[in-house]
Image (cartoon, rainbow, N blue to C red):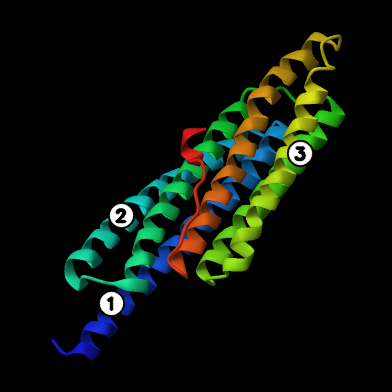
Amino acid sequence: MSTTVARDELNRSLDTLNGAIRRMASLAVSGVDRAARAFVAADRTLAQEVRRDDAELDALAIDVERLVIETYARHQPVAGDLRLLHVSLLTSTHLERVGDLAVDLARLAQRVEPGCADDELEGLIETLGIRAASVLEQAVAALLNRDVAYGTSLAGQDDAVDALFEMALERMAKIGAAPEAMRRWAVEAVLAAPYLERVADHVVEIGRRIRFLVPGQIDGGRDAGGG
């Protein structure tokens, strides 16, 4: 096989891989957005859609792993191509875990009763969902565009989500004297808010991988999968 033909085949494999990551990102962003909206609206139907659609995300994660292994074996990539395969596999793992967080949030949405929410806390949960979905979408765009500068800035985006999370916790602490139905809703909100905060942790990890992808360097940091 000529060098040109081998390069073309490798490029096709990498294009397929990028397409799978794009689709996974779309599903993960949509899942987070819909799960948060389902919780705020106590929309059991929307929550069930999130849980149903997670199956495609899980299947794509398996496809990415298979494609990466096949590309390693067939093309023995080096340098930038090798880093791309490595980062794609790690990003796929983060996106699959984000999908799991969306499913967990959707399960909570199926338990809450409509009309029982604390308005202020409900607004914070809604804002958390919007921000988490937005920064996730931007992170994957930065990855696919090899935007190192933006990838580095994602830690600041996480700080903004963390600030919203702290505001939500402070509000939760003030609901103790509320009616029983609202207190039951607040218990579910206590569980819901950390799921959205953890989405932003995965965003930071994806940002760190962008730095590795382009210059081949990576700094230290926590693993979002560990909490």
| Residue 10 numbered mark, or none | 1
Q: Earlier in the sequence, mark 3 or mark 2?
A: 2
User: Which-is-in-front pick, marks 3 and 2?
Assistant: 3
What amino acid is found at the position of numbered circle 1 in the picture? Answer: Leu
Q: Residue drawn at (78%, 21%), measured in percent from left and top?
A: 172
Judge the density around disc 1: few (<14), some (14-19), many (≥20) Cα neighbours within 10 Å: some
At numbered mark 2, what does the secondary structure look like: helix, strand or loop? Answer: helix
At numbered mark 1, what does the secondary structure look like: helix, strand or loop? Answer: helix
Q: Quadrant of residue 122?
A: top right
- The CA span between labels 3 and 2 is 35 Å
Camera-nearest residue between 87 and 58? 87
User: Which residue carries the number 2 mark?
Assistant: 65
User: Which-is-in-front pick, marks 1 and 3?
Assistant: 3
Q: Are marks 3 and 2 in contact (CB under 8 Å)?
A: no
Q: Earlier in the sequence, mark 1 or mark 3?
A: 1
- The CA span between labels 1 and 3 is 43 Å
| Residue 124 numbered mark, or none | none
Which image quarter is the N terminus in? bottom left
Camera-nearest residue between 217 and 136? 217
Q: Residue drawn at (52%, 55%), measured in percent from left and top?
A: 208
State whether residue 165 is above or below residue 139: above
Residue 147: image location, x then y, percent: 57, 70
Q: Is residue 116 visible?
A: no
What amino acid is found at the position of numbered circle 2 in the picture? Answer: Glu
What amino acid is found at the position of numbered circle 3 in the picture? Answer: Ala
State whether residue 127 is above or below residue 14: above
Residue 212: image location, x then y, percent: 46, 62
Q: Is residue 133 visible?
A: yes
| Residue 163 numbered mark, or none | 3
Q: Earlier in the sequence, mark 1 or mark 2?
A: 1
Residue 30: image location, x then y, percent: 59, 51
